[in-house]
Image (cartoon, helix red, strand yellow):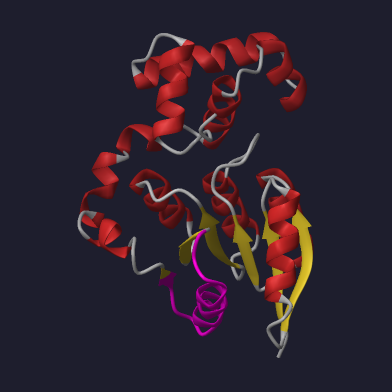
Amino acid sequence: MSVRILLVDDHKIVREGLKSLLEKEPGFQVVAEAEDGNAAVRIASQLNPDIVIMDVAMPECNGIDAAARIRAAAPAVKIIALTMHSDKNYMTGMLRAGTVGYLLKDCAAEELVKAVHEVMAGKGYISPEIAPLILEDYSGVSSAAADGAELTSREKQILQMVAEGLSTRDIAERLQVSGKTIDRARTAIMDKLKLFSVAELTKYAVRKGISPLT
């Protein structure tokens, strides 16, 4: 039976390499590619692939938010994170968003293929070298990430764009709302997080995996 895969990464060369690798495995078919989280959500909703293999740190809509939105729109889709980030905030964020696999980009090709097979069999897969980081304090994830959980999905989206240096006007145009709406949202975010400068917001967004490192 064919395994239909959607690849999501903001680097085309990475997507091309992954496609070449995966399609060498009998039964694996890359049905589409996406360069950011928003495109991933749209394509996953339309095509309903079996597997989404997705980076975590991407512009505009990161992997954590995209994973949650894909799971909401297409619950049967299984998501595997493939990233260079071994930071626990990224890992726990993706797992809480509904991913069933987490691998580092320096893993062997055989490990990625194994992860796809495991996930298709109804199991989860985490790279052995990073699994202890999750297990040692997974029970504390909820309290440790509680401050980030207070933000709505739209607030996280705005925070990511603020952290990436977009102006109020740019954000408003992308979200098709007024500048005053963005200003109010930014103020609400600052109030919730008790942070009072763009620099502090940026540090928070990177630390929580909401915005990629620049």
Q: Is residue 4 left or right of residue 204?
A: right
Q: Residue furthest bottom?
A: 1
Q: Residue at x 56, y 48 (%)?
A: 63
Position above or below: 147 against 77: above
Task: Identify which residue is drawn at 71% across, 91% down.
Answer: 1
Q: Which quadrant of the figure has residue 167?
A: top right
Q: Quadrant of residue 171?
A: top right
Q: Is residue 113 magenta?
A: yes
- What is the x, y in percent for residue 58? 61, 41
Residue 137's place in the image compared with 155, above or below, is below
Can residue 98 be seen in the rendering of this structure? yes
Residue at 44% from the left image edge and 79% from the top image edge: 123
Would you say residue 29 sits in the magenta stretch?
A: no
Per the rendered image, the range of residues in magenta is: 106-125
* Image spot of residue 175 (x, y percent): 72, 26
- The answer to whether residue 6 of the structure is visible from this angle is no
Counting from the top left corner in percent of width and height, residue 199 is at: 45, 14
